[in-house]
Amino acid sequence: MVQQVTSGIKISVQTTFEGTFYKNYKVHFAFGYKITIENQSKGAVQLNSRHWKIYDALNNIEIIEGEGVIGKKPVLKPGESHTYTSGCLLSSPFGAMQGHYNMVNFTNTNKFKVYIPSFKLSAPFALN
Protein backbone atom coordinates (compact mmCIF):
# COMPACT_ATOMS: atom_id res chain seq x y z
CA MET A 1 0.00 0.00 0.00
CA VAL A 2 1.19 3.52 -0.76
CA GLN A 3 -0.05 6.63 1.05
CA GLN A 4 0.35 10.38 0.77
CA VAL A 5 -1.16 13.41 2.52
CA THR A 6 -1.75 16.71 0.70
CA SER A 7 -3.45 19.66 2.41
CA GLY A 8 -4.87 17.35 5.08
CA ILE A 9 -6.31 14.82 2.61
CA LYS A 10 -4.79 11.33 2.90
CA ILE A 11 -4.77 9.08 -0.16
CA SER A 12 -4.15 5.33 0.29
CA VAL A 13 -3.80 2.97 -2.68
CA GLN A 14 -3.83 -0.85 -2.89
CA THR A 15 -3.36 -2.67 -6.20
CA THR A 16 -4.25 -6.11 -7.55
CA PHE A 17 -3.47 -8.02 -10.72
CA GLU A 18 -6.74 -9.21 -12.28
CA GLY A 19 -5.41 -11.35 -15.13
CA THR A 20 -4.64 -11.37 -18.85
CA PHE A 21 -6.95 -11.54 -21.81
CA TYR A 22 -6.91 -11.08 -25.57
CA LYS A 23 -8.72 -8.26 -27.32
CA ASN A 24 -8.27 -7.41 -31.01
CA TYR A 25 -5.56 -10.10 -31.31
CA LYS A 26 -3.47 -8.42 -28.61
CA VAL A 27 -2.76 -9.47 -25.02
CA HIS A 28 -3.83 -7.07 -22.26
CA PHE A 29 -2.92 -7.08 -18.58
CA ALA A 30 -5.73 -6.04 -16.24
CA PHE A 31 -5.03 -4.32 -12.93
CA GLY A 32 -7.34 -3.17 -10.18
CA TYR A 33 -6.80 -0.50 -7.58
CA LYS A 34 -8.60 0.47 -4.41
CA ILE A 35 -8.31 4.07 -3.25
CA THR A 36 -9.32 5.52 0.10
CA ILE A 37 -9.59 9.30 0.39
CA GLU A 38 -9.59 10.43 4.03
CA ASN A 39 -10.28 13.98 5.16
CA GLN A 40 -7.86 14.76 7.99
CA SER A 41 -8.36 18.52 7.61
CA LYS A 42 -10.63 20.79 9.65
CA GLY A 43 -13.02 21.69 6.83
CA ALA A 44 -15.47 19.88 4.56
CA VAL A 45 -14.14 19.16 1.06
CA GLN A 46 -15.51 17.85 -2.22
CA LEU A 47 -13.73 15.91 -4.94
CA ASN A 48 -14.71 17.45 -8.28
CA SER A 49 -12.46 15.81 -10.87
CA ARG A 50 -9.49 13.53 -11.45
CA HIS A 51 -6.36 13.51 -13.60
CA TRP A 52 -4.38 10.30 -14.17
CA LYS A 53 -1.17 9.39 -15.99
CA ILE A 54 -0.93 5.67 -16.71
CA TYR A 55 2.47 4.32 -17.79
CA ASP A 56 3.40 0.87 -19.08
CA ALA A 57 6.79 -0.78 -19.59
CA LEU A 58 6.58 -0.18 -23.36
CA ASN A 59 6.79 3.61 -22.82
CA ASN A 60 3.11 4.15 -23.54
CA ILE A 61 1.47 6.95 -21.54
CA GLU A 62 -2.28 7.39 -21.27
CA ILE A 63 -3.85 10.52 -19.77
CA ILE A 64 -7.29 10.18 -18.18
CA GLU A 65 -9.31 13.19 -17.03
CA GLY A 66 -12.89 13.35 -15.90
CA GLU A 67 -15.43 14.47 -13.38
CA GLY A 68 -15.57 12.77 -9.99
CA VAL A 69 -14.63 9.16 -9.35
CA ILE A 70 -16.83 6.26 -10.47
CA GLY A 71 -19.68 8.67 -11.20
CA LYS A 72 -19.54 10.38 -7.79
CA LYS A 73 -18.27 13.68 -6.44
CA PRO A 74 -17.97 12.77 -2.77
CA VAL A 75 -18.24 15.41 -0.04
CA LEU A 76 -16.08 14.57 2.99
CA LYS A 77 -16.52 16.21 6.36
CA PRO A 78 -13.54 16.19 8.74
CA GLY A 79 -12.76 12.60 9.74
CA GLU A 80 -14.79 11.04 6.91
CA SER A 81 -13.43 8.88 4.11
CA HIS A 82 -14.52 7.60 0.70
CA THR A 83 -13.29 4.33 -0.81
CA TYR A 84 -13.71 3.19 -4.40
CA THR A 85 -12.26 0.59 -6.73
CA SER A 86 -11.40 0.89 -10.39
CA GLY A 87 -8.96 -0.55 -12.87
CA CYS A 88 -6.91 -0.16 -16.01
CA LEU A 89 -5.51 -2.20 -18.87
CA LEU A 90 -1.85 -2.24 -19.85
CA SER A 91 -0.07 -3.63 -22.90
CA SER A 92 2.73 -4.95 -20.69
CA PRO A 93 2.85 -6.78 -17.34
CA PHE A 94 4.47 -3.77 -15.63
CA GLY A 95 3.42 -0.17 -15.28
CA ALA A 96 2.59 2.65 -12.90
CA MET A 97 -0.03 5.30 -12.25
CA GLN A 98 0.01 8.73 -10.68
CA GLY A 99 -2.24 11.74 -10.68
CA HIS A 100 -4.26 14.18 -8.67
CA TYR A 101 -7.78 15.06 -7.62
CA ASN A 102 -9.16 18.58 -8.01
CA MET A 103 -11.01 19.46 -4.83
CA VAL A 104 -12.76 22.40 -3.20
CA ASN A 105 -12.76 23.37 0.46
CA PHE A 106 -16.29 24.37 1.54
CA THR A 107 -15.01 26.44 4.47
CA ASN A 108 -13.16 29.00 2.34
CA THR A 109 -14.21 27.96 -1.24
CA ASN A 110 -10.54 27.48 -2.18
CA LYS A 111 -9.83 25.00 -4.96
CA PHE A 112 -6.79 22.77 -4.50
CA LYS A 113 -5.06 19.65 -5.83
CA VAL A 114 -4.60 16.48 -3.84
CA TYR A 115 -1.78 14.38 -5.22
CA ILE A 116 -2.20 10.64 -5.69
CA PRO A 117 1.12 8.93 -4.94
CA SER A 118 2.76 7.06 -7.78
CA PHE A 119 2.01 3.34 -7.50
CA LYS A 120 3.33 0.34 -9.39
CA LEU A 121 1.31 -2.19 -11.32
CA SER A 122 2.98 -5.56 -11.79
CA ALA A 123 1.83 -9.02 -12.74
CA PRO A 124 3.15 -11.53 -10.15
CA PHE A 125 4.10 -14.10 -12.80
CA ALA A 126 6.50 -11.58 -14.39
CA LEU A 127 8.40 -10.90 -11.18
CA ASN A 128 11.69 -12.66 -10.60
Image (tube, rainbow, N blue to C red):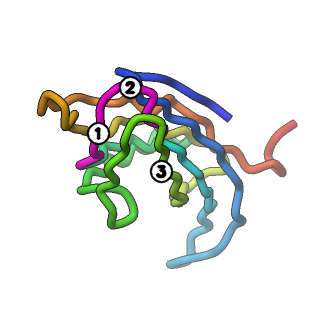
- Which residue does the numbered mark 1 point to in the structure image? 45
Task: Look at the image and say whether residue 47 sits in the magenta stretch.
Answer: yes
Which quarter of the image is occupied by the C terminus?
top right
- Residue 18 tag number: none
For residue 88, above or below residue 75? below
Which picture quadrant has residue 119? top right
Which residue occupies the extreme right position in the image? 128
Name the amino acid type tagged 1: Val
Tell which tag, 3 or 2, sits nearer the viewer: 2
- Count neighbours of disc 3 (C-alpha within 10 A) and say few if under 14, some if 14 to 19, many if 20 or more: few
Span colored in magenta:
38-48
Residue 18 position within the rendered picture, expressed as x and y whole percent measured from the top left: 70, 63
Mark 2 surroundings within 10 Å by alpha-carbon count, few (fewer than 14), some (14 through 19), many (20 or more): some
Between marks 3 and 2, how big is the CA–CA gap? 14 Å
Quarter of the figure that contains the N terminus: top right
Q: Label 1 near label 2: C-beta < 8 Å? A: yes
Residue 94 colored in magenta in the image: no
Query: Which of disc 3 and disc 1 is earlier in sequence?
Result: 1
